[in-house]
Image (cartoon, grey):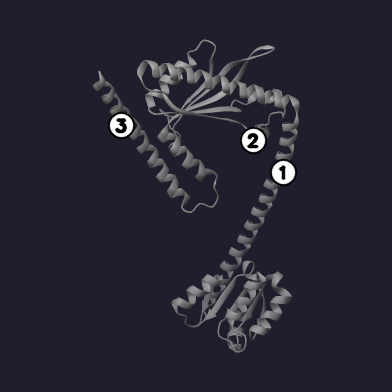
Amino acid sequence: MQKILVVDDAELNREMLCDMLEEDYRVELAQDGYQAMEKLQEDQGGLAALLLDLHMPGMDGFAVIDSMREHGWMKHIPVLIISSELSTEVETHCFELGVSDFIHRPFERSIVKNRVKNAVELFVYKNQLEQKVEEQAETLERQSRIIQIQAEKLREAEPFHRLMMEYQAAIMEVETRLKVLNAEFSQEYNRNPFESIKSRLKSPASIYEKLERKGYPITVESIREHLTDVAGLRVICSFPDDIYRLAELFTCQDDILLVREKDYIRNPKPNGYRSLHHIVSVPIFLSGGKKYMKVEVQFRTIAMDFWASVEHKLKYKRNVDNAEEIVGQLRACADSIEMLDHQMQKIRDRIDRSKG
């Protein structure tokens, strides 16, 4: 049976509360704050709740709460204040101090029993949840350490270095071809189809984590066979039609193989994300001959890229206030960006026609 402590300088109040609660709990009694602290020192690890009068001679209820806060006991013991009439300001202050609830005089048996029961059950659930979160955090920390260790082993392996060099060569190959198309487009139409190119190689830790998550072997051959985004490029264009024109010109080259296309511009993700994704297989030319490597190329407008950058911060930042509201605002912004991109494209077309 769970134990609770009732602290009140009025004997009648102590006896009445003991009578109401002794069927469900082992009830300990204290007549002032000093006795309460003695019993808390002895039993705080095993107390299910503390019923506390605020106004007592000597050490009052506020002093007991202050001492409990210093010891960290408020996190583990629900405190219910025994009171007749309290002002809103006092109740608000008590809640700010971490008090769980109030039991008002005159006592009503059913209300007293239910308030104590709810406070006890809530704290049991809270403590179980906190323990589960701590266990999960420890598990994630262990997994992270394992990933880092394995990633370092992967990084140090000579075949892995060779593979990363080949992926880097594939990135340079794609960049060169896109820049040639950009120069040709600029010469013919007096404007550039894209503004910038950003590239990246997946880190050893990310590679290991993805292989592990998908259940693939942690080998160089497995990376080459199963992962398509080790080498990645992001091509930032000014207008939506430039995206499709540039992507078509690139993938139509006779030695470029389009492995997979995901068009999130015409078919946005539920959160509003828009971008054209191509997985391509491109040739690189080494001393031993030609070899094909997979590269992920993402095409998006300047506005789409700005949106994705903000959304990425929300996705990987913890404890964001009003996260659901922000998600909704981002979705609305994505729709506005689509309209803006097409409006700007129409303005560009009018300018181009007027030049003629």
User: From the viewer's perspective, is 89 left or right of 230?
Assistant: left
Is disc 1 placed on a helix, strand or loop?
helix
Q: Position of residue 146 (x, y in %)?
A: 73, 41
- Mark 3–mark 2 distance (CA, rounded to whole Å): 39 Å
Asked if labels 2 and 3 touch by Cβ distance under 8 angstroms, the answer is no
Where residue 342 sits, quadrant-wise, is top left
Picture quarter with the N terminus: bottom right
At a point 56% along the width and 19% down the height, the residue shown is 173
Examine the rendered structure and indicate whether residue 270 appears above or below residue 217: below
Query: Which residue has dot 2 on it?
Result: 206
Q: Residues within 10 Å of mark 2 (few under 14, many from 20)?
A: some
Query: How far apart are the alpha carbons under marks 1 and 2?
Result: 13 Å
Residue carrying label 3: 343
Measured Cα–Cα span from mark 3 to mark 1: 49 Å
Which residue position holds label 1? 145
Q: Using the image as rendered, state which of residue 119 and residue 335 is in the foreground.
A: 335
| Few, some or many residues within 10 Å of mark 1 (<14, 14–19, 20+) | few
Amino acid type, label 2? Ser
| N-term mark: 3 or 2 | 2
